[in-house]
């Protein structure tokens, strides 16, 4: 499947304009950054998430995880299709999770799209537009995040069998990157000004089992922590079952590893955890949380919870509500159960109404708002190390080591005239607090 687009470009010397639109999670973002680098080296004029649809080619990197994400991807494709009909976009390429999962249906429903590709099909996309994939660019990307932080993907795919999750069907089995390859990529990022590395994978804690025959996340963290000028290393997406306790020792002992752990528990009711195939029960969950807090005093825990899973009773939900209230997670996200074909849970009856699901989301988030406000107020008068991400109106906006970009709390600092502190670390004294925002001064 090829076109003559690139050959026309070579003949005319006029750089084709390509807009890469990224939807979904940070893992998708890293994929787009890799593709952007390949396109840039091939001499295309590239942009990312441009609102102006006036390019020769638009590449849409889709998400197909849950219903809301799928709808956003479909709406985005339809919007670009409309631009193609109006003549402002010439070619449309769709890739990523939605395309991998529903390519046949998408081809039938949206034939205006010129090509559909799956996850990580960079070579096929480049071949379609007449360019070559440069294997020597291993680890190189065009960062779309602020230049002082970057996501570092350490593995692809997932071997877990959670009953509600379609990711293993979309992205395949867990494949760890070799430690030396990750360290090389991290070193390249740091040499280009990155100060914070955010480790991502479908499951960080499974890292190494496939290629080293044992869990090697702790060893990888030590290697990354040794890289000169890495100020923060952050862990996202850690699976609770069979959690490698050696990781806690490294987090505790290494100053440049954030006292922060993103660990999705999803639920606390034993019969739902069993149906979800999470590999851990209520007792194991509570023991793990106690162990983490004991081994790493002051650690911030982020979790995600699912409400409305098939068979979730009012009693189950109240148990979940009490669990969140007792643990008082520092950061918490709530998802409504999405009934996904190809998953084990799809055989169950999706018997919780959308109204009840939303009511349960609202109740959990109201509880978390109260917890977050209480925790934030306790920080008034304290000095915290903050990295400055951006300027927004009259404020500089930053984060503490207890906060990931986009999803967690922020620190707002009155912006002095002509100050240039974006990307810098500042000691900030907290002067006021709201539910999800802290206010401070340097």
Image (tube, rainbow, N blue to C red):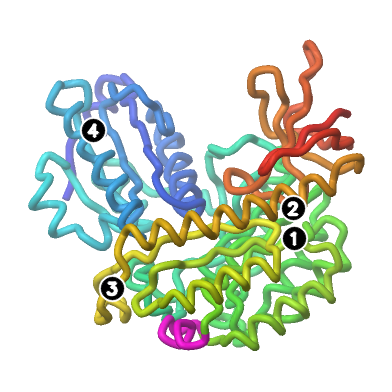
Residue drawn 40% across and 61% down?
336
User: Callout 3 environment at 10 Å: few (<14), some (14 to 19), or many (20+)?
Assistant: few
Question: Mark number for residue 216?
Answer: none
Residue range (magenta) = 270-278
Q: Nearer the viewer, residue 321 or 193?
A: 321
Please check the rendered image and state whether residue 281 is part of the magenta-colored stretch, yes or no. no
Q: Residue furthest top?
A: 417
Secondary element at tag 4: helix
Q: How many marks?
A: 4
Question: Is residue 77 shown left or right of residue 236?
Answer: left
Q: Which of 86 and 114 is in front in this view?
A: 86
Question: Is residue 77 shown left or right of residue 52?
Answer: left
Q: Where is residue 299 in the image (x, y as percent from the top left)?
A: 79, 63
Q: Where is residue 32 in the image (x, y as percent from the top left)?
A: 44, 45
Up the image or down, 295 lies above or below 6; here it is: below
Residue annotated with mark 4:
80
Up the image or down, 385 lies above or below 138; here it is: above
Contact between marks 4 and 1 (CB within 8 A): the answer is no
Residue drawn 35% across and 32% down?
19
Q: How far apart are marks 1 and 2 (CA)?
A: 6 Å
| Residue 181 visible within the image | no
Question: Mark number for residue 402?
Answer: 2
Contact between marks 1 and 2 (CB within 8 A): the answer is yes
Question: Mark number for residue 351?
Answer: 3
Please check the rendered image and state whether residue 272 is part of the magenta-colored stretch, yes or no. yes
The quarter of the picture where the C terminus appears is top right
Q: Which of marks 1 and 3 is nearer the N terminus?
A: 1
Q: Which of marks 4 and 2 is nearer the N terminus?
A: 4
Mark in the foreground, 3 or 4: 3
The chief SS type of the magenta part is helix
Residue annotated with mark 1:
300
Q: Distance between the residues labelled 1 and 3?
A: 34 Å
């Amino acid at each position: 499947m090829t076109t003559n687009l690139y050959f026309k470009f070579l003949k005319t010397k006029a750089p084709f304009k390509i807009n890469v639109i990224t939807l979904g999670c940070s893992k998708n973002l890293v994929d787009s950054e890799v593709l952007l680098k390949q396109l840039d080296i091939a001499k295309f004029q590239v942009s990312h998430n441009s609102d102006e649809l006036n390019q020769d080619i638009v590449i849409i990197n889709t998400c197909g995880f849950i219903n809301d994400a799928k709808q956003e991807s479909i709406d985005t494709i339809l919007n670009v299709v409309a631009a193609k009909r109006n003549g402002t976009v010439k070619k449309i390429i769709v890739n990523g999770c939605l395309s991998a999962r529903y390519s046949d249906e998408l081809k039938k429903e949206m034939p205006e799209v010129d090509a559909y590709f799956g996850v990580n099909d960079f070579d096929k996309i480049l071949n379609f537009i007449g360019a070559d994939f440069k294997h020597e660019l291993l680890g190189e990307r065009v960062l779309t995040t602020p230049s002082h932080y970057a996501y570092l993907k350490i593995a692809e795919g997932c071997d877990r069998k959670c009953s509600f999750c379609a990711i293993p069907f979309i992205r395949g089995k867990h494949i760890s990157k070799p430690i030396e390859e990750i360290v090389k990529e991290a070193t390249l990022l740091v040499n280009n000004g990155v100060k914070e590395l955010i480790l991502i994978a479908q499951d960080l804690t499974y890292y190494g089992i496939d290629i080293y025959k044992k869990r090697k996340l702790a060893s990888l963290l030590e290697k990354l922590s040794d890289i000169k000028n890495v100020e923060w290393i952050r862990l996202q997406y850690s699976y609770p079952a069979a959690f490698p306790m050696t990781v806690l020792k490294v987090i505790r002992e290494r100053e440049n590893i954030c006292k922060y752990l993103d660990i999705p528990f999803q639920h606390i009711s034993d019969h739902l955890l069993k149906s979800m195939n999470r590999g851990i029960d209520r007792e194991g969950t509570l023991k793990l949380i106690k162990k983490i807090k004991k081994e790493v005093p002051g650690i911030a825990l982020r979790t995600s919870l699912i409400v409305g899973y098939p068979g979730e009773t009012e009693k189950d939900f109240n148990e979940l509500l009490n669990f969140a209230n007792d643990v008082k997670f520092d950061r918490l996200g709530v998802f409504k159960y999405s009934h996904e074909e190809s998953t084990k849970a799809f055989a169950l009856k999706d018997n919780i109404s959308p109204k009840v699901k939303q009511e349960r989301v609202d109740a959990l988030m109201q509880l978390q708002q109260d917890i977050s406000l209480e925790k934030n107020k306790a920080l008034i008068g304290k000095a915290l190390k903050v990295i400055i991400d951006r300027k927004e109106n009259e404020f500089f906006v930053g984060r503490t080591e207890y906060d990931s970009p986009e999803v967690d709390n922020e620190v707002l600092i009155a912006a002095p005239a002509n100050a240039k502190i974006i990307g810098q670390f500042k000691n900030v004294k907290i002067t006021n607090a709201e539910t999800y925002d802290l206010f401070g001064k340097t």
